Every structure is written in C-alpha cells, then in structure tokens.
Image (cartoon, helix red, strand yellow):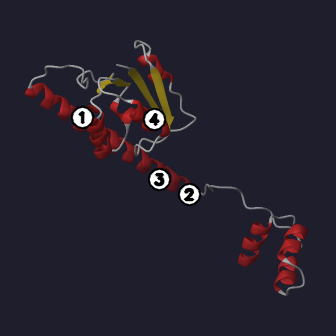
C-alpha cells in the first residue's frame, strides 16, 4: 500500500509550499503536482496518479478544492478513486473526509458523503465567483480607459503613401511592410483600417 500526495495550484506563478508543508507529516511514496486550473481533471500529474493507484493506496490532499473545482467531476473522481480503484482519500482540512475510517456506520457514511457534496459545491461556486470577479475587474478597467494587450505600433509618417502604393499594386505587401518598419501582419491589419 502506497501513500501519494496530490498538490494543485492554478497557475505556474502560484506557490505550493502551503500544501507541501501540510503533507510533511506523511511519509509519501510519491508526490504529484499540477500547476493548472481545477475546472476539470485533464491534468497530467493527476492522470499519472490515477494510473498508479492500486487497491489500498492512500491519496492525501490538503483540501477538496485542491483536488478540483467542478462539483460533478469532484464527486465522479471521488467515486473512481474510492470505488473503482478501491483507494483511500484523506482531505487534511476536513478529517471527516478520511475514507480510511473503516467500520463506519450508515450515519457516518451519510454524513461524510453530505460533507463531500457541500465542499464540492463550495469549490465550484468559488471558481465561478473568481471568474465573475475577474470579468468585472476587466470591465471596470476598460470603462476607466485601461487598454489591454500590446500597444498599437506607431505608424510611420509615410504610412498613408505606402498604403496607397500597396493598394495600387505598385509595391508588394512585403515591400510595404519592410519600408514601414512593421511586420507584414501588422501592416496589413492597419492598412485595412486606414
């Protein structure tokens, strides 16, 4: 029986130290780390973990939202891990979600399942709230005049003349772009607006 740790952060910039510190108390056979959104379970390290699991193995996660942030998929993966793979799961932040506790009566199992569903719901709701707040922030910034993306390239003084010559087929797109000092795609896009 092996003990595996699973750690997930949403982006490469985020630090997984908090989760690693929480797992330091375990003697892990292997640690799997994903730096990817929890919206689904198409994650390289998670899929590798799933492929390694055998009956009786233990998966340790810091909290249910580190496993994922999609309500239905968390419940489905929990079923796969515990029923199909016959592995155990320990969620450190919620000791009630420790499937190693054998001999639970029906009430204990019911309560654990209920807590799992509630926490899965909360994880997905938080993901949706993060996305909504992000879009609201972007909309507010745009309303204040903040521009996103690369700044538009400055047009040379001879741009109008180059556009006219290019449209009249006096010069090629490559020549017009070269003379303007702009990449071909940029020249073409800006010339179409001019």
Q: Which residue bears the numbered disc 4?
A: 48
Q: Quadrant of the C terminus?
A: bottom right
Label 3, on which residue?
Answer: 135
**Residue 173 marker:** none
3D distance between C-alphas at marks 4 and 1: 18 Å
Label 1 vs label 2, nearer the camera: 1
Closer to the chain start, of discs 4 and 1, is 4
Distance between mark 2 and mark 3 Cα atoms: 10 Å
**Residue bearing the label numbered 1:** 83
Circles 2 and 3: CB distance less than 8 Å?
A: no
Residue drawn at (78%, 70%) of the image: 187
Q: On the image, numbered disc 2 is attached to which residue?
A: 142
Q: Residue at x 58, y 34 (%)?
A: 13
Q: Nearer the viewer, mark 2 or mark 3?
A: 3
Distance Cα–Cα, label 3 vs label 4: 33 Å
Residue at left offset 43%, top offset 17%: 28
| 1 or 3: tag closer to the N-terminus | 1
Outermost residue to the left: 106
Instruction: Locate residue 80, reporting x and y percent.
Output: 29, 38
The N terminus lies in quadrant? top left
Q: Please, which residue is most extreme toward the bottom here?
A: 168
Q: Residues within 10 Å of mark 2 (few under 14, many from 20)?
A: few
Q: Which one is earlier in the sequence, the residue at label 4 or at label 2?
A: 4
The quarter of the picture where residue 121 lies is top left
Q: Secondary structure at mark 2?
A: helix
């Amino acid at each position: 029986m092996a003990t595996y740790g699973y750690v997930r952060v949403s982006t490469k910039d985020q630090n997984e130290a908090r989760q690693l510190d929480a797992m330091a108390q375990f003697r892990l056979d292997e640690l799997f780390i994903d730096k990817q959104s929890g919206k689904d379970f198409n994650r390289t390290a998670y899929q590798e973990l799933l492929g390694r699991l055998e009956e009786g193995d233990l998966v340790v996660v810091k909290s249910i939202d580190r496993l994922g942030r999609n309500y239905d998929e968390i419940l489905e993966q929990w079923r796969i891990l515990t029923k199909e793979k016959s592995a155990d799961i320990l969620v450190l932040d919620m000791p009630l979600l420790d499937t190693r506790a054998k001999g639970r009566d029906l009430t204990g199992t019911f309560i654990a399942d209920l807590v799992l569903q509630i926490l899965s719901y909360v994880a997905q709701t938080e993901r949706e709230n993060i996305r909504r707040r992000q879009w609201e922030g972007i909309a507010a910034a745009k309303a204040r005049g903040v521009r996103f993306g690369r700044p538009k390239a400055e047009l040379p003084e001879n741009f109008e003349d180059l556009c006219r010559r290019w449209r009249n087929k006096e010069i090629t797109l490559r020549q017009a772009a070269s003379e303007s000092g702009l990449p071909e795609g940029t020249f073409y896009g800006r010339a179409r607006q001019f």
